[in-house]
Image: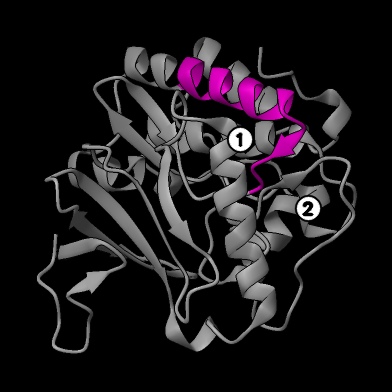
Amino acid sequence: MQPLGADEPAAVGPYRLLGRLGSGGMGRVYLGRSAGGRTVAVKIVHPQYALDEEFRARFRREVAAARRVGGAWTAPVLDADPDAPVPWAATAYAAGPSLARAVTDHGPLPAHTVRALGAGLAEALATVHALDLVHRDVKPSNVLLTLDGPLLIDFGIARATTGTASLTATGASVGSPGYMAPEQILGGRVTGAADVFSLGAVLAYAATGTPPFPGDSSAALLYKVVHEEPELGPLDGELREIAAACLTKDPAGRPAPA
């Protein structure tokens, strides 16, 4: 946790902010506390996006999707004001590092831990897909490792599988290069199979410490995902088979989460 800067708010809604937990494309996340002493994670949209209705729509979508999924597989939404001058949402604080932070700090995870991670994430995706939602941004930084198992966070670009609306404003991210499925990159129909592709990439990263599609630029990553086979390195045995099956280019050839 980082201390609050001079230009950062001391409070948002009814929550006093204690420090900054992190920052992403949509906004910053702070550790906050309610008047009654409850610890929460408060996500605040970057001020430059507050006047952009497409970003407000994306934020409303994140809040609605997280509320539909509930608290078993994501940090539950406790409070939110998507219509505030600077939109914000408060979720239960989940104590635990992201998968990205854990691998960066400690290296690849042991095989049995990767198996448990995969089982937990697959069960989470089965729940998400049963609600006719697709997460669309499963990546190491969006997976929290907690004592109760992995949690999926940041449903900012999730949408109903039957929906046709897309958020494609200039500069808006529609996924994460290197973890997006080929059909997502190419603008095709995105179903739960896209999350399974991302799951395969996440498992490969957790087991080897490197993403299966390495590259120095977004363009290179996107090209590799669409046209090249994943680099699975030392991954072997059943974990390699599972990751490779998830990373199949054809959505119809990937396994279901179950």
Residue 194 placement (x, y as % from top left): 73, 39
Secondary structure state at the residue bearing disc 1:
helix
In the image, residue 75 lies in the stretch drawn in magenta: no
User: Is 177 above or below relative to 239?
Assistant: below
Q: Is 102 on the left-hand or right-hand side of 195?
A: left
Q: Which residue is mark 2?
A: 184
Q: Earlier in the sequence, mark 2 or mark 1?
A: 1
> Is residue 215 or residue 53 the one in the foreground?
53
The answer to whether residue 230 shows anywhere in this view is: yes
| Residue at 13% across, 67% down | 2
Amino acid at pointer 2: Gln
* Residue 224 as seen in the image, left or right of residue 49: right
Q: Which mark is residue 54?
A: none
Query: Which is more toward the observer, 97 or 18?
Result: 18
Q: Which residues are magenta?
A: 118-136
**Left-right relation of 237 to 222:** left
- State the SS at label 2: helix
Q: Residues within 10 Å of mark 2 (few under 14, many from 20)?
A: some
The amino acid type found where label 1 is placed reads Arg
Give me the residue at 57% from left, 32% from top.
69
Quarter holding the N terminus is bottom left
The answer to whether one can see residue 177 in this image is no
Q: Residue at x 22, y 79 (%)?
A: 9
Horizontal and vertical percent position of residue 147? 24, 22
- Residue 217 picture location, percent across and down: 56, 72
Callout 1 crowding tier (Cα within 10 Å): few <14, some 14–19, many ≥20? some
Residue position for label 1:
68
Q: Relative to residue 164, is residue 173 depicted above or below?
A: below
Q: Position of residue 67 (x, y in %)?
A: 55, 39
Q: Quadrant of residue 138?
A: top right
